Amino acid sequence: MADLIMKDVAKAYGEVKVLSNINLDIKQGELIVFVGPSGCGKSTLLRMVAGLESITSGTLSIDGRVVNEVPPAQRGIAMVFQSYALYPHMTVRDNMAFALKIARKSQDEINAAVENAARILQLTPYLDRLPKALSGGQRQRVAIGRAIVRDPKVYLFDEPLSNLDAALRVATRIEIAQLKENMPDSTMIYVTHDQVEAMTLASRIVVLAGGGISQVGTPLDLYERPENEFVAQFIGSPAMNLLPGEIVETGPETVVRLSVGGLVRTAVPTRDSDKGLKVNVGARPEDMVPTEADEHLFEGTVGITEALGEVTLLYFDKKGEAAQVIAKLPGIHAGLRHKTLRLAADPKKIHLFSNGRSLLYR
Amino acid sequence: MLQQLITAGLTIAVGITAAFGYFYGSNILLDLIFPSKAPGDRGTRNIRRAGVIRPWLFVGPAVLALTLYLVYPVVDSIWLSFHGRDGHEFVGLKNYIWFVGDARIRAAFLNNLLWLLVVPAASTFLGLVSAALTDRIFWGNLAKSLIFMPMAISFVGATVIWKFVYDYRAANQTQIGLLNAIVTWFGGAPEAWITVPFWNNFFLMVILVWIQTGFAMVILSAALRGIPEETIEAAVLDGANGLQIFFRIMVPQIWSTIAVVWTTITITVLKVFDIVYAMTNGQWDTDVLANQMYVWMFEGGGDYGRGATIALIIMLLVVPIMIWNIRNARREMEGR
């Protein structure tokens, strides 16, 4: 019903191209998260959906209707801003009722909608307060309530948790997840730069980078089968280690000799012609395990350790040109500093990239 | 001419040197009298004492000047208002009784009320509209400069300019007044605008509105820019049109600034004298209190008693608005 389809959508400010080639098919009931580094255009894309930014080319359709030229209020969307954007001179009730008043709904209808939203968000005791008398979390809930009363087809969230402190952010994130659960039919688009929010909330994540879509997929898809080095390093923390090497054995399993020494076996299949191909081997810090065996992925001296209790992060001394290798071992490991350690990883968890793209996708 | 310039320059130089010398010298003197490097307890005690005296040294000249030029005249005015023409014989409340009963004063008072109703409202409204509109056009800054320019003209200068606008020549002559030129171009008969009772008040008010709109626009434009962009975007998403956004989202958010602008102009209006004096001198039923004050004080030999009485009453009218205005401005600065 409320499908949202972007076809070749692009945005340019004069000569400067911000976004291009955006093709996206969002189904009703999905919670889509746009993530990407700052300046990748994720907020711009959301504002284009909202109608606050014009669409330079391509078409955007909601519910089968092309809405490129439809004014924001008639697109069937509602937006929650990062700064809440509450009307400071109106009470919570008036803030939520404003859109309905503008739409000339009857007083009964307005009251019912506002009280319903207030009940869902536990705002009933605060209905007659001004925004300045509310805490940050409450203000954010009012902003969400303002969206709910309009009963939109698509909810848009623009970094809604960025202004909250860490504890409140987690609590509000769970509230949003519950809200989504209670409204299974509503479509949501959520912009964030926080990959934890993306991983926990999304039914599908859209990774934006370099003015286009890098990859679209479920959170675990992106984690387990990243299409390119950017996604591989963007999802997961600390970022995936990338080590340059050369394919020495092909077949259903591939063997790569690393330029920093070490030999690694991976479950990524390769063709005969791939022999000798320069590749980057990707291994997530949490997939690296210490080993005594001869066949190892990496051997290095531990430079710095960070003990977080549940895990210990090991930062190895840099070897030549290669980027610093980080390993994440479960539990507490004391006394590893300045020791030389050998690491291996499960072949199923080793990724291969050639020219930045994964060999799984070709 | 050159002589005057040299004198002026010299006065400025001497004044600034004296002021600088006073602050610098008195500061050094204070430190000499209470040396902070004195041994033991005396040192800290000296610092404390010097700290108590220093502010008074620094604000002293300003306090003196204020006393001489503000407090003393007020006290003297109060004293004068209980005395006769020449300021010697005590007359009690006679001047105040005269003020309440006099027909010309009452006419001036009513005109003042009219000014109070029209000018602040018109200036603030036009200032708000021009602030909102000039923010939207590419030549907005030029428009703003043009609207603001009358602020730089003295009231008398502005009145002279508008005298030409309202100028009247007999019907068979070429009209050099802008207004009459337009009227005759449309086929109407020329009119001596500033002599038309009642309406001529408005012709005078236009001058002050013309001057004050620029002031209102500048302040309100800054306030409008302070409104968070997101609240406006949220209103757009909520379906509000331009007018609804302006009146229901933007204006309420700058309400306190509007109040400050309004009251500031109100105070200016209560003091308005130059425009009336230069344009009509109160003739043709255009008199206002401040002009009456001037007339009684300095014309026809001068009646210090009545002049002072009118001045005091104008002051009493301004004070409450002033207090409210200062409070409001302060609250604004503290971010409410």
Image (spheres, rainbow, N blue to C red):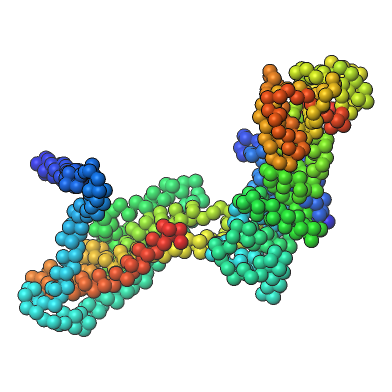
For the point 73% across and 50% down, which residue is it? A189
Percent from the top left, x then y, of residue A132?
Answer: 54, 62
- Quadrant of residue B326 in the image? bottom left
Q: Where is residue A2 in the image (x, y as percent from the top left)?
A: 80, 55
Residue drawn 20% across and 70% down? B311
Q: In which quarter of the image is the N terminus of chain A?
A: bottom right
Q: How many numbered discs?
A: 0
Comparing B280 with A335, the one in front is A335
Which residue does the image show at 40% across and 54% down from the upper left?
A: B218
- The image shows residue A345, relative to residue A63, as above or below, that is above
B312 or A115: nearer the viewer? A115
* Image: A143 above or below B32: below
| Residue beneath the point at 73% across and 62% down | A151
Residue A234 location, quadrant = top right
Residue B49 visible in the current orientation? yes
Residue B48 in picture, x, y percent from top left: 26, 51
Outermost residue toward the right in this view: A252
Tell me, yes or no, if residue A57 can be seen here: no
Seen in the picture, residue A254 relative to B259 is either above or below; the reply is above
Q: Is residue A42 above or below residue A16?
A: below
Q: Along the horizontal axis of the image, is A272 left or right of A179?
A: right
Please state the horizontal and vertical placement of residue B229, each as a whole percent of the image.
56, 53
Q: Which residue lies furthest to the front in this view?
A: B40
Q: Which part of the image, by quadrant, shows the C terminus of chain A?
A: top right
Left or right, A247 with respect to A356, comes to: right
Q: Is residue B117 left or right of residue B55?
A: right
